[in-house]
Image: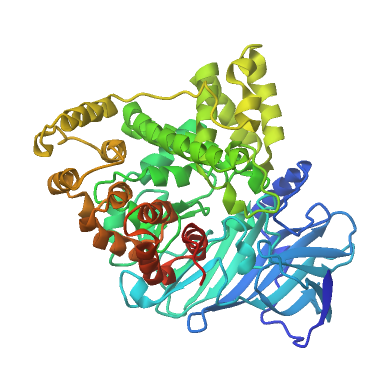
């Protein structure tokens, strides 16, 4: 259904851009984006019809209003009418549309869906002609826009200035920019963003490294990206260089710790380039966000968004940086056409991350990380099989009518990783690396779906031997449920050391006598996760007295400990767990800890008591998940 609105505001907030000023690089990127149309864009999570009319470039002019917690903006699009259609359709969610221009002329009629879809939002249909080149939309965001988190000063480390960050993946870009919000649609962009003069703005684009006096920042992204990779952060930020291509943004109180933690970043970039070809995005910087950020990291091109929970003081959690860097090839360079193919982004990235870690820290270290991911995969697949979600254990997942966030389980990440690891072990690393390098180069700045990739894999690699396809069992891995029997599980001598110490402890050896001095973070995580599910108070106190897991400065270790001991009613950990849950918004930690409370004597009542305090600090992504875990109604 459509409802027609008469526009009462007939002015533009900002001048439209002149599409003739696009750079040659931008034009080249748009040619690559056109090539992506060889794969028909069919996305159940977008109203847009990009095979008929598609965006090519965005000029975005915006003002960030911290008092009202909104963005006031104009999205000025260069478009291409591919089929001679009479409309172009954008995805929106809770946006207030002020005016629309087509080829520089304000139009009085446009169409919006009268009934917003709770997942997809509202479509915006704008009438166009066969030769229409430009569409501009002036609008305001809602204070409840799900992609935007406005933080008060007390929610930041410095406690002085407010903060804003965006999280567009999977389909939340439409809540702050009207867009053809599908990963299969790529466009270049430039932006002018006005913020308070004492703050800095950065985007997934060419960025400033110093604050200016005006509070107006200009950005350019000449490489074509999908809407979920458009990102903005505004706050009290400083920048420090790490390497020739790398650096870090953070609040002043965090910057030195971040520089120390990410000292290996340039080595990671160099290693990745040696493996699979040139890094094509110019700079690789990281911004450390406030702790409410709902994910470990987000691979926004040129500017990875990262949680402060990876700052452990010993560089032990930087596999996350390797993961987000790897996305510069798998995901950002070659992108899943829609979220049902997300394993093409995430499975490849976990594999690439593991290779980077192996090159820098050694095979045994990489194997430890892989074994931990295998445990995660086995546990989640078992849970899916037992709760009626067996279909979600397929790599190619069906998300029609569902939130694409439902597909963000360990399956696309870790099952995808092990599928690729199996291919490597079957054909040999040399052939596999050559194939991947060719794949990233041939499909750079284009989109990919599962069927096309499997055909490409067969024609360019597996066809070399008649046995490889059957040995791997490609169909079972991609379209089958559960975990195939031929999954390649690595081994680790370091974990064997942990197993030996666990045996001694279970036999009565004192915790203070265990040989743990040289253990790394993966070993400690393996130790905690290998503890019996049922622990008595004496055992938990002994472990905590010896190793102080409850007060660990390593958030991974602390969260693993809470998950293990809260179901055993370890009251000593309860207050610290509450502090953790109020401060940290990373969903990976929140979900298992709240579920642990549900298994304890404290139960749902205690979980809800904590959640009432913590919920206002969480991003909408985390709120939605924990609301469901706790059956919470706001």
Q: What residue is drawn where x is 63% and y is 12%?
A: 465
Vertical order, 450 against 466 (above or below)? below
> Which of 363/441 is in front?
363
> Which of 364/383 is in front?
383
Vertical order, 256 against 451 (above or below)? below
Q: What residue is drawn where x is 58% and y is 47%?
A: 407
Number of numbered callouts drawn: 0
Q: Does residue 552 show up?
A: no
What residue occupies the far bottom of the structure in this picture?
A: 8
Instruction: Quadrant for residue 393, please give it.
Output: top right
In this picture the colour scheme is rainbow
Q: In the rendering, at what x and y percent does residue 118 appear?
A: 66, 65
> Which of 352/417 is in front?
417
- Image position of 319 (left or right of 458): left
Instruction: Quadrant for residue 254, please give it.
Output: bottom left
What residue occupies the far top of the structure in this picture?
A: 466
Q: Does residue 440 show up?
A: yes
Quadrant placement of the N terminus: bottom right
């Amino acid at each position: 259904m459509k409802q027609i609105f008469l526009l009462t505001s007939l002015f533009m907030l900002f001048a439209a851009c002149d599409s003739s000023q696009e750079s040659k690089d931008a034009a080249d990127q748009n040619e690559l984006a056109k090539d992506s149309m060889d794969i028909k864009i069919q996305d159940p999570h977008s109203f847009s019809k990009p095979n008929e009319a598609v965006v090519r470039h965005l000029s975005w002019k915006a003002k960030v209003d911290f008092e009202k917690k909104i963005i006031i903006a104009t999205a000025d699009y260069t478009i291409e009418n591919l089929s001679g259609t009479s409309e172009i359709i954008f995805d929106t969610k809770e946006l207030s549309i002020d005016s629309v221009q087509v080829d520089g002329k304000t139009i009085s009629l446009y169409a919006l869906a009268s009934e917003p879809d709770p997942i997809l939002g509202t479509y915006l249909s704008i009438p166009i002609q066969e030769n229409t080149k430009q569409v501009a939309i002036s609008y305001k965001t809602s204070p409840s826009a799900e992609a935007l988190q406005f933080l008060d000063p007390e929610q930041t480390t410095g406690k002085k200035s407010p903060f804003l960050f965006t999280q567009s993946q999977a389909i939340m870009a439409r809540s702050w920019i009207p867009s053809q919000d599908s990963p299969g649609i790529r466009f270049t962009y430039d932006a002018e963003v006005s913020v308070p003069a004492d703050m800095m703005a950065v985007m997934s684009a060419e960025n400033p490294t110093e604050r200016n006096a005006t509070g107006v920042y200009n950005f350019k992204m000449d490489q074509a990206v999908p809407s979920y990779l458009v990102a903005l952060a505004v706050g009290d930020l400083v920048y420090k260089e790490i390497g020739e291509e790398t650096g870090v943004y953070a609040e002043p109180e965090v910057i030195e710790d971040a520089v120390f933690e990410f000292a290996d970043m340039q080595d990671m970039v160099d290693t990745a380039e040696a493996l699979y070809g040139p890094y094509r995005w110019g700079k690789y910087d990281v911004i450390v966000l406030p702790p409410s950020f709902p994910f470990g990291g987000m691979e926004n091109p040129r500017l990875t968004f990262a949680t402060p929970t990876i700052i452990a003081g010993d560089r032990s959690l930087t596999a996350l940086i390797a993961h987000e860097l790897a996305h510069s090839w798998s995901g950002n360079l070659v992108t899943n056409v829609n979220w049902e193919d997300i394993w093409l982004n995430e499975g490849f990235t976990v594999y690439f991350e593991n290779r980077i870690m192996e090159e820098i820290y050694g095979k045994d270290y990489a194997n430890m990380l892989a074994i931990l991911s295998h445990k995660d995969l086995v546990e989640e697949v078992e849970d899916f099989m037992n709760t009626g979600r067996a279909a979600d254990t397929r790599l190619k997942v069906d998300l029609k009518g569902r939130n694409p966030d439902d597909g963000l389980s360990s399956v696309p990440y870790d099952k995808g990783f092990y599928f690729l690891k199996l291919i490597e072990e079957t054909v040999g690393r040399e052939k596999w690396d050559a194939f991947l390098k060719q794949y990233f180069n041939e499909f750079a700045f284009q989109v990919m779906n599962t069927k096309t990739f499997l055909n490409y894999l067969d024609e360019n690699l597996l066809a070399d031997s008649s046995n490889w396809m059957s040995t791997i069992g490609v169909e079972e891995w991609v379209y089958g449920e559960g975990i195939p029997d031929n999954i390649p599980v690595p081994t680790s001598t370091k974990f064997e050391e942990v197993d030996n110490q666990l045996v001694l402890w279970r036999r009565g050896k004192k915790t203070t006598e265990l040989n743990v001095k040289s253990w790394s973070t993966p070993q400690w995580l393996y130790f905690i996760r290998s503890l019996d599910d049922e622990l008595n108070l004496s055992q938990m106190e002994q472990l905590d007295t010896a190793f102080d897991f409850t007060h660990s400065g390593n958030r991974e270790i602390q969260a693993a400990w809470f998950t293990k001991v809260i179901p055993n009613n370890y009251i000593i950990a309860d207050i610290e767990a509450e502090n953790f849950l109020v401060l940290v918004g990373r969903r990976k930690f929140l979900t298992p800890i709240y579920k642990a409370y549900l298994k304890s004597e404290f139960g749902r009542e205690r979980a809800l008591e904590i959640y009432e305090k913590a919920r206002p600090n969480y991003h909408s992504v985390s709120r939605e998940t924990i609301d469901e875990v706790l059956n919470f109604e706001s």
